[in-house]
Image: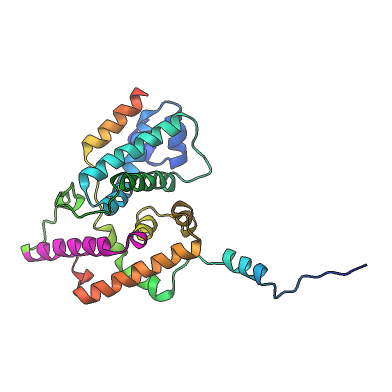
Amino acid sequence: MSTIKLQSKSDQDLVHQYLQGHEASLEELIRRHKTKIYTSIYLLVKDSYLAEDIFQDTFIKVINTLKAGKYNEEGKFLPWVIRIAHNLVIDHFRKEKRTPVVTTVEGFDIFEVLKFYDESTEDKMIREQTHRDLRELIHLLPPEQKEVLIMRHYGELSFKEISEITDVSINTALGRMRYALNNLRKMMLSKEVSLKNS
Amino acid sequence: MIETSTPTTNSLQNDMVQNTAIPEELGEGEQSFYNSIKKNLNTIVRTPGKDVIARILKYSKSV
């Protein structure tokens, strides 16, 4: 099947095809969702190498579950994978018995690959600084607020799905998102981060 | 025969209604701020290396 045909398939169709032995369908699912899943993991662990390990373990679990015929077809694919990734992140911190730390390891950044040819050096510096600032502000959020923001934005999960994954009420999940946004806004004001420049 | 009725002020019942009726929405100000930073949140995304994806696909073929 051609790549274009695969791109027009729904996640559910791709899962079905994969279960019938069509390996390219898995490749398309990964291509489609890798950025959201990897970013969700990276923003929680703040280490690109560790994020890659957890990303890999997530998909190994996905593959094993699919091939064992244990995938619940009623669920959406991305929220399901995000749930697995989230559980693996929690497992990692439980094993390490530590809170996330900032590392200096810089991973593969898609925006370093996308070239901004028309950009002046000053504009580029401002844009890069703004990206760094926003990442840092997200890292400064309390873990439970950061978690909800990441799952909501990058995982496209509903508050109901987030509440089920994090084992809290919908109201609490919604409240954490509100706190996350309010805290981000306050930090941006105090640090004078201008998002218009990015 | 004893006639029974459930008062509409039943607190447990009202709490249940309230919990199931929680809208999955943010307040207007919060939603507006969220909308304003969505683009920026999308610009800090990262992607895993090609090697990781190659390893995943190799694993899939091996099982």
Give the quarter of the figure containing the C terminus of chain A. bottom left
State the colouring used for the structure image: rainbow
Q: Residue at x 40, y 36 (%)?
A: A62
Q: Note whether A194 is above or below A3 in the view shown.
A: below
> Is A175 within the magenta?
no
Q: Residue at x 49, y 37 (%)?
A: A71
What predominant SS class does the magenta segment belong to?
helix
Residue closest to the far top: B62
Q: Is A68 in front, or is A94?
A: A94
Q: Is A145 in front, or is B37?
A: A145
Residue closest to the far front: A97
Stretch of the chain drawn in magenta: A122-146
Give the quarter of the figure containing the N terminus of chain A. top left
Q: Could you say where residue A56 lies in the image, as x and y percent from the top left?
A: 30, 37
Q: Note whether A44 is above or below A64 in the view shown.
A: below
Q: Residue at x 90, y 68 (%)?
A: B2
Residue closest to the far left: A121
Q: Quadrant of residue A157?
A: bottom left
Q: Could you say where residue A125 lies in the image, as x and y percent from the top left?
A: 10, 63
Relative to A91, is B12 on the left or the right? right
> Is A124 within the magenta?
yes
Q: Is A182 in front, or is A87?
A: A87
Q: Residue at x 70, y 76 (%)?
A: B9
Q: How many marks?
A: 0
